[in-house]
Image: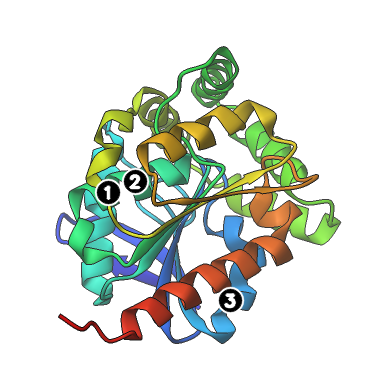
Amino acid sequence: MERIIPLPDGEQMACMTFGQGRPIVCIHAPCIGSVNFQYQQTLADSYELIIPDLPGHGRSSALAKPYTIHDLATLLHRLLGALGLERPYLLGYSQGAAIALEYALCFPEEISGLILASGFSEVDDLYLHSRFSVAQALATLHGVPLLARSIASSHTDDPQTRDHWIQHASRTDAVTLKQLYAAGHSYRCTQRLHELSMPTLLVYGGEDTRMHPYGQLFRRHLPHAKLIFLPGVPHQVVTKAAASFNQLCRDFVAHEKKRETIPSFT
């Protein structure tokens, strides 16, 4: 079900909600929108899924001025407050992982854990720098339809699903998208990762070798985190290995729930 949530500053955010139970907030990558987590909707049999459209995506308000990942985390915090969510898990995919990280750094006591899929805490190699630069240029040149088709095609082979993704992503506001890519490109929080103590699951595709150093970087700074590489899977773990990824999410949340119920003897 889609909900339109008015925010105190006059903006609005659209979000999809499914199921009941422990809340999991899913944060999508740029130029996709809430459809990014279509393959995670099966988790709604056990959890409440909240999947916002970031600013400029879907029916969420566009942002006219430059903004940062911190600004997006603050905006997301206002949204979750309006929804009355208590200590959700945050699931961030690709650049969405950066927003989840910033949220966790700003509001550590207000979340139960992090699930970061194909994520990064900084952009520190030529490959990712070039990907961001090309995406920013396309957004500047009003290339949103091209980005939408390319991203949808890389995530799913199903024609009906691909068309649905393209239709949703093609509505993305170009100016807001350019600023979103710029915010992700400049974001760095590696030196602050030691501040995070909440349970964390890191998931990467085994074939996504250019992103593996970012997983290892997380592992060095988050020694308590669980790092998983899914064999034979590219960057798009949320769609290309949805069944395996979803099971990892279930196991992670169930494990942490079990830990919460174990009595402490002091």
Q: Residue 45 in the image: x percent, y percent?
A: 58, 85
At a point 57% along the width and 15% down the height, the residue shown is: 130
The crowding category of the residue bearing disc 1, from other C-alpha atoms within 10 Å (few below 14, some 14 to 19, many at least 20), is some
Q: CB under 8 Å between callouts 3 and 1?
A: no
Distance CA(mark 3)–CA(mark 1):
26 Å
Q: Of the residues under marks 3 and 1, which one precedes in the sequence?
A: 3
Foreground tag (3 vs 1): 1
Asked if marks 1 and 2 touch (Cβ < 8 Å), the reply is yes
Quarter of the image where one finds residue 38: bottom right
Which secondary structure lies at badge 1? Answer: loop
Q: Is residue 17 visible?
A: no
Q: Is residue 6 left or right of residue 43?
A: left
Q: Residue 140: give x, y in percent of width and height.
A: 49, 21
The disc at residue 2 is: none
Q: Earlier in the sequence, mark 2 or mark 3?
A: 3
In-front residue for pair 54/231: 231
Residue in view at x 75 percent, y 52 percent: 240
Is label 3 in a helix, a strand or a loop?
A: helix
Question: Which of the two labelled residues, at mark 1 and mark 2, occupies the earlier sequence position?
Answer: 2
Q: Which mark identifies residue 101?
A: 2
Give left or right: position of 123 versus 186: right
- Count the numbered circles shown: 3
Specify few, some or many for label 2: CA neighbours under 10 Å numbering under 14, 14-19, or 20 or more.
Answer: many
Check if mark 2's residue and mark 3's residue have beta carbons within 8 Å.
no
The residue to which callout 3 is attached is 43
| Residue for point 64% across, 76% down | 42
Residue 178: percent from left, percent from top: 44, 28
Q: Pointer 1: what residue?
A: 196
